Amino acid sequence: MNLSHRIRLGVITAAAAAAVVGSAGLAEAATAHIPHPSPAASSAYRDVGVPSEIDSSAPAIAPDGTRIWGLTALPFGGHATRASGANRDGRALSTQSSVEVDILASGARLRTSVPSGSVVALAYPGQTAWGGCQISGRDGWVWGWLTVQTSAGWRSGWMRHDLWSITQHTYPGGGGDPRNLPWC
């Protein structure tokens, strides 16, 4: 192969490589201009997270404004969910009028307040969870005041309604078949 043929082959190879690289650059440039959802539109996505975003030191704000700190030995931190009441020991009836709920999504965020409070825990399908009451958030979603049993204790907070549902009570003594949590 003579020198001029090698030069021509090199020029053709360089041109072909430039075309491939140039078209990749155009593809990247085209995707860079695709609009991303606005923060307001992001509320349409499931409110699920990852363990690294948990702020375990933040207090959850109960429906009556009480702050519930960290993990507790009783559901809802021993705090009555809606109606006041006490057991024989004088402690609040923590699950009074509570309803068992199923967690529907892995990593469902349990927040300190509605709609964008700190994430205090993540909940997963199969965990025991109780719902106390629900409110309408300013983001357009219904939020439930829930308590979730973790391996270390109970954690309470607010969870968006699309991430949980009422458990169907079919066992003896399960009571009625509630369709929704009562309003706070």
Image: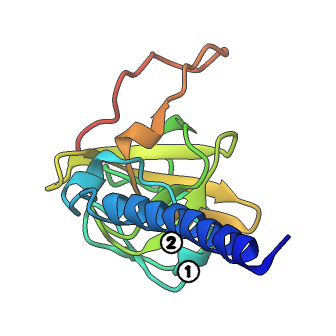
Badge 2 crowding class, 10 Å Cα cut-off, few under 14, some 14 to 19, many 20 or more, is many
* 125 to 54, vertically: above or below: above
Amino acid type, label 1: Ser
The front one of 161 and 60 is 161
In primary-sequence order, the first of circles 2 and 1 is 1
Badge 1 crowding class, 10 Å Cα cut-off, few under 14, some 14 to 19, many 20 or more, is some
> Residue 18: x and y, percent?
52, 70
Q: Quadrant of the N terminus?
A: bottom right
Q: Which residue is mark 2?
A: 120
Q: How is the image coloured?
A: rainbow
Query: Tag 2's secondary structure?
Result: strand
Q: Which residue is mark 1?
A: 56
Residue drawn at x 81%, y 75% is 2
Residue drawn at x 28%, y 56% is 34
> Residue 170: x and y, percent?
61, 13
Identify the mark at residue 130; answer none if there is no mark: none
Left or right: residue 120 compared with residue 47: right
The front one of 78 and 21 is 21
Left or right: residue 44 compared with residue 152: left
Amino acid type, label 2: Val
* 17 to 4, vertically: above or below: above
Left or right: residue 1 compared with residue 65: right
> Residue 47: x and y, percent?
42, 54
Q: Residue lying furthest right in this view? A: 1
Residue drawn at x 64%, y 48% is 124
Query: Tag 1's secondary structure?
Result: loop
Query: Would residue 149 be visible to someone looking at this image?
Result: yes
Contact, mark 2 vs mark 1 (Cβ under 8 Å): yes
